[in-house]
Image (cartoon, grey):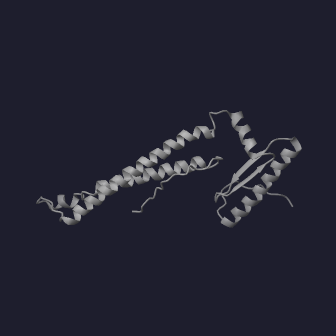
Amino acid sequence: MVRQKVELKFIEDVQKRRVSFSKRRCGLMKKAHELSVLCNADVGLIVFSGSGRLYQFASSSMSRIITRYNLATGPSTSLAQSDLSPLLAQQAEEIRSLKEELMTMESENMSLLKKLNNQPICYKTANLETALTLRPPCFDVDMRMHRIEMMCIIVLKGMERSYVGETISPPSSPFVVASTSF
């Protein structure tokens, strides 16, 4: 039986894609092992599946191979853990300040809503069309709160991406950023 050349394109069928990933991952691991044995090479292989599961192979110690890689490529292409500490501290401080600003805006929003509920909205204009296009006074506060929440989410996603592939663990922090749905 003759093997046919496989066209390289995304596999739409989920089951076929999983089977193909499993077979190709095993083949890749086998080739990495053969390369390390036959050529006495230090080989490190890291594979993340589509669901985020980690598969790895190392001919010796993975941390030693990664350290050798970092030394060989230089500090410009990779961040050492000591380089990440100031960055993480800065991001934690930024999140803390955004949380404080969010809390302030929420309290302002609550006070504006109380004022709005206690007093009927009266537009002092004879033009009904103009009156209907005016925004309630709490709209600007809601938009600012939404922007701050979105900034917090973006910062947290950036922090999450910085942890992927790194050997460090996220800093333990006393605060949790919660987003509300609109």
164 or 135: nearer the eye? 164
The mark total stands at 0
Q: Is residue 146 left or right of residue 90?
A: left
Do we see residue 165 in this rendering?
A: yes
Q: Residue furthest left?
A: 126
Q: Is residue 2 left or right of residue 55?
A: right
161 or 30: nearer the eye? 161
Residue drawn 26% across and 62% down? 113
Q: Is residue 2 left or right of residue 7?
A: right
Residue 25 rendering spot, x and y as whole percentages: 75, 56
Find residue 132 and report its image quarter. Answer: bottom left
114 or 164: nearer the eye? 114
Do we see residue 142 in this rendering?
A: no
Residue 131 rendering spot, x and y as whole percentages: 18, 60
Find residue 182 and report its image quarter. Answer: bottom left
Q: Is residue 61 left or right of residue 38?
A: left
121 or 50: nearer the eye? 121
Residue drawn 25% across and 63% down? 114
Residue drawn 44% across and 48% down? 96
Residue 49 rendering spot, x and y as whole percentages: 67, 57
Residue 70 rendering spot, x and y as whole percentages: 69, 37
| Quadrant containing the N terminus in the rendered view | bottom right
Q: Residue furthest right?
A: 38
Residue drawn 73% across and 63% down? 19
